[in-house]
Image (spheres, rainbow, N blue to C red):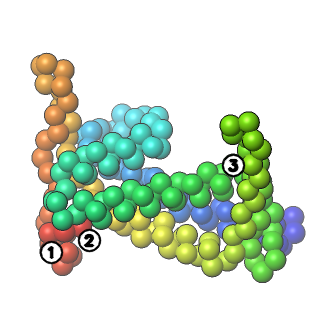
Amino acid sequence: MSTDLDAACAKVGRYLYEFALLEREINASIVQILDLKSDAADVVSHSLDFFKKVNLLKIVANETAPKEDVNALQSLFNDIAKLNEGRILMAHAAFEPAANDGVQFRVTSARGGAVRVRDPLWDKKQFEDAYAKLQSTREKVKKVRPSLTVTISPEGKSELLSAYTYGSLMSANVGGSYY
């Protein structure tokens, strides 16, 4: 392999690595929400589709968050969706090295009877910004990780119990708010 191709593969690989760390944090939140133990935690967290996990976390977070944090939570979940678009590009598009330490992706799709060619070019700064965004988003997910369990009532209804743990947020001078 050429040095340029090695560098392009390293950039794409780093994005996927950073995304995997974000997904691991989301998995830990799901395990906590569902109060899963041992092997059950791995089986459930690795069997759920990514957006099903994100949706579960979003529902629980929105139900239990202080009103002043709802907009910040919406922003967090929008960021996660946008970062997932990058993951899909990195994982499923062909790519090659490009000028100025960039990576050229090749994406052709067909929707609604029309062929769409979308060949995004990511430069070094775009990758560095994405890595930083993935890291900061992972830290935000840690901050909003709820301490919840889900129980099923005799009538078969799901009930959320408990609320966010504010102790660690207060000690971080967040003032009771996640952001």
Label 3: how many Cα within 10 Å (few below 14, some 14–19, many 20+): few
Which amino acid type is marked by label 2?
Tyr
Is 54 or 162 nearer to us in this picture? 54
Label 2: how many Cα within 10 Å (few below 14, some 14–19, many 20+): some
Question: Left of 103 or right of it: where is 137?
Answer: left
Is 96 or 22 nearer to us in this picture? 96
Relative image position of residue 172 (x, y in whole percent): 21, 76
The residue that appears at 73% across and 44% down in the rendered structure is: 109
Q: Secondary structure at mark 1?
A: loop
Q: Gap between marks 1 and 2, in whole Å?
A: 9 Å
- Please name the residue that numbered disc 2 is placed on: 179
> Marks 1 and 2: CB-CB under 8 Å?
no
Question: Left of 158 or right of it: where is 134?
Answer: right
Relative image position of residue 168 (x, y in whole percent): 18, 68
- Please name the residue that numbered disc 3 is placed on: 92
Which amino acid type is marked by label 3?
His
Image quarter in which the N terminus is found: bottom right
- Please name the residue that numbered disc 1 is placed on: 175
Relative image position of residue 90 (x, y in whole percent): 66, 56
The residue that appears at 16% across and 59% down in the rendered structure is: 66
In the rendered view, tell whether residue 34 sits above or below residue 13. Answer: above
Is 119 or 153 nearer to us in this picture? 119
Which amino acid type is marked by label 1?
Gly
Q: How many marks?
A: 3
Q: Secondary structure at mark 3?
A: helix
In the rendered view, tell whether residue 10 sits above or below residue 115. Answer: below
| Residue at far right of view | 2
* Rendering quarter of residue 155: top left
* Rendering quarter of residue 43: top left
